[in-house]
Image (cartoon, rainbow, N blue to C red):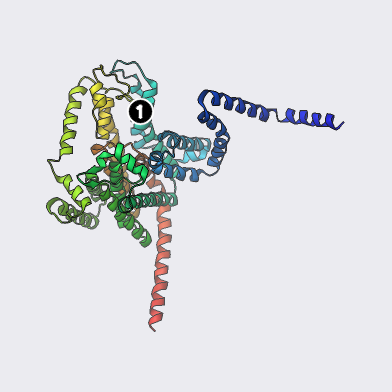
Amino acid sequence: MNETSSVRRFASNTQENRGRYLLLLLLFIAAIYQLVSMGLGGLMIVCLLPLAVVFVYLAFKYKMFTFWLLFVINYFVMFLNRYQYMPLPSSIPNEMLEILLLCIAIIDAKMFLEAKIANVMLIALLIWCGFCCVEVFNDTCDLGINIGAWYMGARLMAFQLLYAFLVCSIYISTPQLLRQFLKMWAWLSIIAVAWAFSQKYIGFTQTERMWLLYAGRTHLVNGITRYFSVFSDAANFGCNMAGSAVCFFVVSITSRIKKDKLFYLIAGIICTWGMFSSGTRTALFCMIAGFGIYIVLSKSFKIGAGTAVVFGLFISLLAFTTIGNGNDMIRRMRSGFNRNDASANVRDINKAAIRKYIQDAPWGIGIGMGYENVPANNKFRKLSTIPPDSEYVFIWVHTGYVGISIFLLTTMMMFVGACFVVFFQLKSKSLQGIGGGLCAAFTAIQLGGYGNQILMQFPNVLIFYGGLALVYTLPFIEKAFVEEEEQRYALQEEKNRIKEEKRRASRV
């Protein structure tokens, strides 16, 4: 009797939960199949699927936590990749989180509809992404259409720019979130410089020594070590620190809140040290260009003249004196003013060779086409093997004169549009400072991309393209920003008044 009732209960339970049991059965079959066909790696993927479902649920519930998680992973993904802590290609976690955030915003229709994304930058990015989509039909090398290779290249060259714009425009929508964005960026930069400091004064880890030995030999130049921190290489680290320093200095200059002034001033100084420790000479010119743009956007003779004088003296000391030559970092940066520099000459030779071959490839050799898939007997094999040494040259090689022209045009569109917002639409001096700092940082990283192949590298796209996207949202949050700033300023003044009263009372 008991046995019969147990069977009936089991049958009833199975009837009610047949969907769950079927799902478990399918997962079990999939796990066995993956184990047989792909080994333990495939089995692990199937076993992690339930965790992925839980993660997606939590991501929907805690949207901003997911955004900040993206921001942190974006910053440290190359570090994790170097230490082989990243089981996936370095671009995948970023892309998955960005697409997940966009799906959340679309499902939450109110959030998507209220986002301020209809602007010049969106148009420019759509033009560039549209061109890169057309490039899928580029068969200059006569190898047929390779959709897989094209998509791998287009993701990094175009689509990630659009993702960064959309995610930042949608999720950073209030003054509080804007301040958190800047502070998160500053803290991550400080952590990166701290790691570079440890590399310099404590030493490289075993993994970093191996990387220097095999992949990073250019980081040991004439007895000078170029430090790369948690970034892919020293050039990426140096240019990122230059752009970050410019933004933080500008925000410090224009903020009305004393603790913010102090925090961003310290962050700017720390990033400047990081820039010098990288030994990346291009980074110095990135900083010069960034400050130059801010001087124009400041609309203040006092701020512009002061910034120009201080920075002009700094550059003059590097360019025309030998002060500080005992320091290897200063000596390395000073060599950037040497017109007879050997590495610069090598780059000029490479560009001349590229110019010769690219004449027959006005659309480039194709996005995603490289030395690994262009055979040795191909006419354009040489183009696929010459080191581009620059993001702009890389785009030129793969998309030709047509592509680099469109990229330059769309970059100028989004940059000039952002400058227009800062110069003409914003009234708050503090908000003008934030907008001007973000435009200056974008200028810095673009110049870095002209000198080195770092523009599309992590973590630059989300920070600098995402930061420029925020400039377009500033007019919509200006009223709320000013109100919050007045409250913070009043609280600051009240604290100062109380301290002054206590100081006077202690004298009596």
Residue shown at 17% from the left, 49% from the top: 334
Name the spot of residue 85 as percent of width and height, x first: 44, 40
Horizontally, residue 40 falls left or right of residue 359, namely right
Name the spot of residue 300 as percent of width and height, x first: 24, 55
**Relative to 123, is 336 above or below?**
below
Q: Helix or strand or loop: what does disc 1 sit on? A: helix
Quadrant assignment for the C terminus: bottom left
Total labels: the figure holds 1
Name the spot of residue 261 as percent of width and height, x first: 34, 59
Q: Name the one closer to the observer, 111 or 308.
A: 308
Dividing the picture into quadrants, the one containing residue 133 is: top left
Identify the residue position indicated by label 1 in the image: 153
Q: Can you see residue 253?
A: yes
Q: Name the one closer to the observer, 383 or 119.
A: 383
Horizontally, residue 476 falls left or right of residue 382, namely right
Q: Residue furthest right?
A: 1
